[in-house]
Amino acid sequence: MDSGNEVKKQTKKELFISFEKLRKEINSSRNELNRINDQKESWFRKKADLSDTTRKKIAQIKENKKKRDSLTKNVKELKEKRNKLAGETGKKISELKKLKSGLKNLEKTSKIRDPLRIKRDMDKIEIKLETEAMSFEKEKELSKKLKLLKKLFEEASVIINVLNKIKKLNSEIDASKKNTNMVHNEIQKVAAESQELHEGVIKTSKEIDELEIKEEEAFKNFINLKKNFNSLNTGLEKNLGEIGGVMEKINKFKLEEDEKKKLEESMLIKSKEQEIEEKIKTGKKLTTDDFLAFQEIIKDKQ
């Protein structure tokens, strides 16, 4: 019997050693799980933040591409307008050259050198005739001169008409050149805006590529940590199952020992009771220990 008790004590000791080992492993696993979970969630948040930033930049690229394409279309339209103005200006310049060449030929064949001066002289004579008092002879002389000037002026009308056309064309050419320059400046301004947007799109595209690499790295870290977490959690669940089994065995040992102790106490009391009864029957003297034991027997029966 002593040998059996020794085996049970040793087995119980081993169970407590196993229990303590499992308890330490469980606590260590829980701490490690918390640490890994914090890292795992941190990488997941980082991945989510990178993904959100990428989405915003993609939306920005789409918007900038839309603006750039609109500006590119505007540049194309402005260039067409500038080319049209330049073409019209070229035609007017060509026409002006022809008029100037024709004017030179007219001036060569005509005796009239300055038609505008003739007009000024005519105006002066007409004013004099209308406003100044003069003799009949003087008036007759001026009238004759005026008539001659008018004849000359009529002959010079072709030249004057050419001069008027030249003047008009010069004015139109200046206005056309001014408009062409304005359109050209607008083209440069819009083209610069379009180029700036284009460069921004390229830059943002590169940033998106870098973000996607970082996002993929963050996701890989998250997945690896999740695998570690699940693996460690599986081990923890196994240890929890094992420690529950060990605890159950320990409780069973405790229950058996309690029952054994109660049985031994009961047998001891029964033995003492028989001993006291025998002393009373035989008339033997009861000791103080016998009286104390007798009180315990009565107490247990109650």
Image: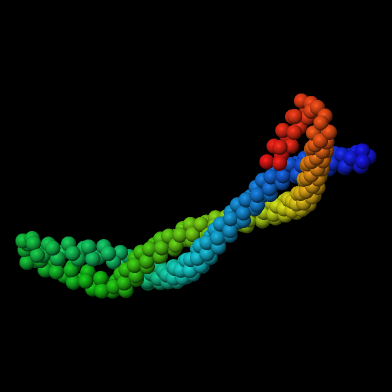
Q: Quadrant of residue 301?
A: top right
Task: Identify whether 177 is placed above or below 22.
Answer: below
Taking the spot 37% from the left edge, 66% from the top edge, the residue there is: 172
Question: In front here: 204 or 16?
Answer: 16
Question: In front here: 250 or 94?
Answer: 250
User: Where does the image place residue 37, in percent across and percent down from the top left?
Assistant: 68, 48
Q: Quadrant of residue 258?
A: top right
Taking the spot 41% from the left edge, 60% from the top edge, the residue there is: 178
Taking the spot 8% from the left edge, 60% from the top edge, the residue there is: 132
User: Where does the image place residue 292, in percent across and percent down from the top left?
Assistant: 74, 29
Taking the spot 18% from the left edge, 64% from the top edge, the residue there is: 123
Task: Identify whether 181 is placed above or below 17.
Answer: below
User: Where does the image place residue 60, in percent across and percent down from the top left?
Assistant: 54, 58
Question: In front here: 121 or 44?
Answer: 44
- Left or right of 281: which side holds 178? left
Q: How many marks?
A: 0
User: Where does the image place residue 86, in percent across and percent down from the top left?
Assistant: 47, 67
Q: Is residue 250 visible?
A: no
Q: Quadrant of the C terminus?
A: top right
- Left or right of 151: which side holds 103? right
Q: Quadrant of residue 38?
A: top right
- Left or right of 297: which side holds 189? left
